[in-house]
Image (tube, helix red, strand yellow):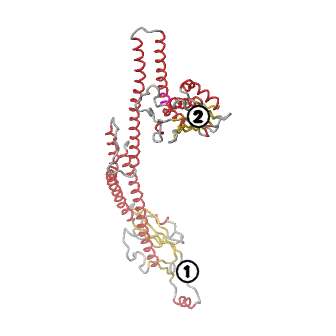
Amino acid sequence: MRTLRWRLVAGVLAGITLLFACGASLTYMEIRSRLYRDFDQTLFQRALSLIAMVKEDRGRFELGRLGRGVEPPGYEPGVDYYLLSSRPGEALVISRDWTNSALDAIKTSADAPRFLAIVLPGDRDGRAVAIETRVEVEVGKRVRAAAARGDATLPQGPLVRMVFARPDTVAAALRDIRSMLLSLWAGCSLLSGLVAWLVVRSGLKPLDELRGQIGAMRDTVTGYRIRLSSPPLELEPVAGELNRMLERVEAALLRERTLTSNVAHELRTPIAGILSTLELTLARERSIADYKEATADCFEIAKRMHWLVNNLLSIARIEAGNVKLHRRSVRLRSELIEWWNPFTVRARERGLQVEWRIPQGAEIHTDGEFLRVVMSNLFDNAVSYAPEGGTVLIRAEGDGSVSVGNLSPELDPQTINRIFEPFWRSNESRSDAGAHAGLGMSLSRKILELLGGTIRAEIDSNSRWFVASIQIAPQANRP
């Protein structure tokens, strides 16, 4: 019963079987009620016909004019049983083959006839009706005539009890009906089980097709999509979600291959630089100054490689959710100036002017270390890509907004949003490999999402003034 097919078949069969059982039970009860109602009506009419024949004359009771020992018309020996008795219990008229005193113990009521099951001679099942009534009294013609004139009333006859019984033929008919209903129930259950199996088997064909297509994917998902021949409405969203999942998996695999290729490209150039520098240095004896210069070059290349690896590890940690935030109050003016200090030498070498537009007392509540990583990336891009002798404009507000602006002739509005793609650079030839890997803005976006904020980039198509802006969410900007 672990398969869906058997569960559905068992559930459908159990439901149909229960429905048949309830229907058969209700049908049987209705048939039984009607048969006994008709049977009891026949008993009642027969008892009334016998009571109508009872006559009393001077204390003696007879069934019509038949006299004692003479059975009434329609009497069937062994089938009809009757007992006429007075209220104290004295038997007045009784069928000749009545040998059981069970009829004598039946209690009657003057309000309505009473029907009950009894045991007849020979231990046969029977059914009886008991009636209490008053019989007609034979009186003289004068009394009748006087009564007709209103001079006198007819005397009231004595109260007698009539019990009439017959063998219960309904019980045998009900046994046959029960057997028929049981046979019908068993046959319908078997047929229902077969029909349920066929219906479920046909209904689950799309699932079998889906399972087959999923199994056919095996180790590759590139370009593979689920296409069912005639999917039911319930499976259409499942197939759609599977296809969307396959698209995401395919995109993830593409990103993985792209990442591997990009990392290889980014590491190949600095490693080649280190190797060539060391090879050239070791080719012959050199002065201490040459060795120091070669060591300094290798150190700078190693720092860039270290920065690349740290950025990759940070992105991986954020995507895996293995990062804990430590929020604190960040005083924007003092801390942004402190984070800018590592870039002052390069900015001075390129003749860049820095403008600070940060009001005193502006502060935000966020993770200071992560915000420092974001701002360091923005500062590094500004120092690297601003034209020599240009200006870097740094703005901040207490509402959590910070922006860094500079001229950027290499960017245009059509490609501005690509700066957030991992390893994307405006210089597709990668001639600056080792200097910039194209991970800073991608890492900054992931950090801002982690902090509950946003980052966007804008560029004026005329002036080519580039602005990178971040916004810390207000709810995250409260202590």
* Relative to 62, residue 19 above or below: above
Magenta run includes residue 314: yes
Where residue 381 appears, as percent x and y from the top left, is: 51, 31
Kind of residue at badge 2: Leu
- The image shows residue 311, relative to residue 159, as above or below, that is above
Q: Residue at x 40, y 11 (%)?
A: 282
Three-letter amino acid code at the position of disc 1: Gln
Looking at the rendered structure, which numbered label has been put on residue 393? 2
x 39%, y 32%: residue: 258
Residue 156 has which mark? Answer: 1
- In this view, the residue in front, 93 or 179, is 179
Say which of 245 and 428 sits in front: 428
Measured from the top left, where is residue 321 in percent x and y? 51, 33
Q: Which residues are magenta?
A: 312-316
Q: Residue at x 59, y 25 (%)?
A: 341
Q: Quadrant of residue 454?
A: top right
**Quarter of the figure with the C terminus:** top right
Q: Position of residue 416 (x, y in %)?
A: 48, 39
Q: Secondary structure at mark 1?
A: loop
Q: Residue furthest front?
A: 389
Q: Disc 2 on helix, strand or loop?
A: strand
